[in-house]
Image (spheres, helix red, strand yellow):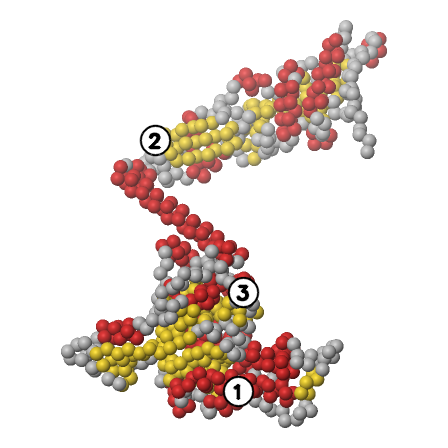
Amino acid sequence: MAAVEIGTGKIAVLVGEITRGRSLNLIGVGVAPSRGVLKGEVVDYKAACEATHHALETAEKRAGARIEEVWLAQTGAHLDAFYNEASVNVKSADNTVTALDIASVCALAKEKELPAGRSRIHEIRRPFRLDGRAVPDPEHLTGRRLEVGYWIVHGPESKISDNIHVVGGYHLEVRELVLASLASGSLLTSAEERAQGVLVIDIGKGVTDYVLYRAGHVLVTGTLPVAGDHLTNDLSIGLRVTPAQAEMLKLRHARATTLTRDKTDKVWLNGDASFGDRQLPKMAIETIASARILELLEVVRQKLGPAFVPEHCGAGVVLAGGTAKLPGIEDAAARVFGLPARGGEPPGWVKDELKDPMFSTVLGVFQFGLRAAHEHTVPRRKTGLLSNLTKIFAAS
Amino acid sequence: MNPVADNSPLPPGRSWRHIRQEVKPLAMSRQGRRRQLAAWLKVGALAAFVVGSGWGVYAFARSWATDRAALATAVHSEPVREVVLITDGVLTRDWTVQRLALPKAASLMVLDLPALRDRLLASGQVRVAVLTRDFPDTLVVTLQERTPVARVQAADSQGVAKQLLVAKDGVVYDGINCDREMLARLPWLDGIRLVKSGNGFEPVAGMAEVSALLSTAQLQAPHLYREWLIVSLARLAGRDEIVVKAQEVPEIVFSRKRDFYKQIAQLDSVIDAAHRLETVPALLSVNLALEGQVPVRLQGTPDELAATPAPVFSIQPLPRKTKRDF
């Protein structure tokens, strides 16, 4: 299997091999600069295909294996989500909850129709409630009223299709779509942290994904079309430099919190004494960057709305994504959310070369595949006889 | 924009799994089309394998139902009852059976065919031997035999002289069942040393040239070839010369470096020229090994030869082609 992230800044592919039917080993990596993708959406099919297929081919070559199916990360401002709840009266005379009750309440909660042209990506269940008390599994328990809620993530079918078809253009099947925020969140937090409550914010180049866990369950997910590119854009406009120069300044001198107090402290624009090179006040760079980061984090907090309660978020804030490498971003997050914040630390099985925060999403997707290999819970897409025969032959 | 996007209205609330993942070939990259082709080839190979296996099972089942005995005999073959010989030479089935010395009541399946083939190849007369099992009880032997080029005289283990044959590749063999008249027409080989090797002799070196000379003569000038009695290889290693003793001319010297066809043509011209003279001279030697001239030695003492007018042999040279000027 392969985990694929078609991001705004880069396209990353990780290839894994399921050994002995249970464990997944990482055997190949392919990374390519992204093209034809804006804020997580494919805007130039050909360019996106070229970049993605190059990354896939590189990963296949390094792995020395042929990819058979793909787990694809999904992000972008086009994604939306809502919460839908349903309740049923327990049918049996002795008020014992049966599997039928559970199935019917789940079906009812998921039944909510979406606007035309939109497709479901995830249906994330929250805990069951039996007569108002939260229970992980209500079967065989006694109660009168069974309730359950689903966090349903959906997006426009045309844009989801574009992502899927970019992979399909390499003659590959997408086995599962994984929300980028869920991928990062599951990778960078432990079960204990999720039980305590934790907010994970993945700030990429084009979009910012976030997920809020409470009591071990996903409470809210979301995506903002604001991220590192906006920081670069602000620097470009504010300092009157080209976007490429602004990007360089961001990587070299930007901070999420202002540290420099001396207005005369200056940095060179290019630093190579070339024609047009000039000095810029370091304080201005830090001020612009910190203002944008604080604004971004404020927007996340606003989007979370009443769902975010600092008292229910004991494990604090975890930051991921390429922009999370900005110095001082933990302090900025702590100031905005009033909680301790830290950079996400990938688990020990991750190779050193992939420990960069920008690989959090693709690693998280990979971990989803690993879990599926363990649990065998992900239903396979229905495929034709010919496709199955091909797979049997490929496996032999 | 994505050329495969479906613009038809979609029912509300579909899962992403309902999205059609297949992409038209035109919307695929080069790598994608290559992968698709590889997948089709795999499917084709798999289909061929399945069809082949199915046909095999069907054929087995049919044989099982209709002719179970044939299957049984294939698996448990019967003792060899017949040996069939197919040959391009003169060896007989009796000789073959005797040579093979098959164990009595030996099953066809237990026969060691490579060992049996080696027994046949031990006779120099057999060049190629192929043995095949023809179930249920027949062994088919196909032979290709050597053709003799010349004869040679050798002593057997009791010291009695016997005639052996020499093939084009220099192999010396007994020549079983060969036609006596054909053997009588073969020239004798001289100037060689037979070296013992096992039960036979080492191959004679230089027989390829001898064979080329004899076959050219046999084909182009059979009237000359009939007269040839002995072919000597004594000077072959040292001077690249093959010396032939004919009934009319005691010594005809050929060079293996020159075209045999040309040399035989020159010999024919010399003999013809000699026969056209009023007094036919007795030729003692004709040397064809030299380029541009053919020395001829006549019989008689110097005085006798001096007394008679010298015969004139005229071999008109062919007009030479002018070289193209560059």
Mark 1 residue type:
Leu
Q: Chain of mark 1?
A: A
Label 1: element kind: helix
Q: CA distance from mark 2 to mark 3?
A: 79 Å
As drawn, which residue projects farthest toward the left? A93
Q: CA distance from mark 1 to mark 3?
A: 32 Å
Mark 3 residue type:
Asp
Q: Position of residue A323 (x, y in %)?
A: 54, 80
In the picture of the structure, the residue carrying the numbered disc 1 is A294
A340 or B258: nearer the viewer: A340
Q: Position of residue A281 (x, y in %)?
A: 67, 87
As drawn, the label of residue A44 is 3
Q: Is residue B275 above or below residue A10?
A: above
Q: Position of residue A53 (x, y in %)?
A: 52, 63
Image-quadrant location for residue B101: top left
Q: Residues within 10 Å of mark 2 (few under 14, many from 20)?
A: some
Q: Is residue B310 above or below residue A147?
A: above
In the picture of the structure, the residue carrying the numbered disc 2 is B81
Nearer to us of marks 1 and 2 is 1
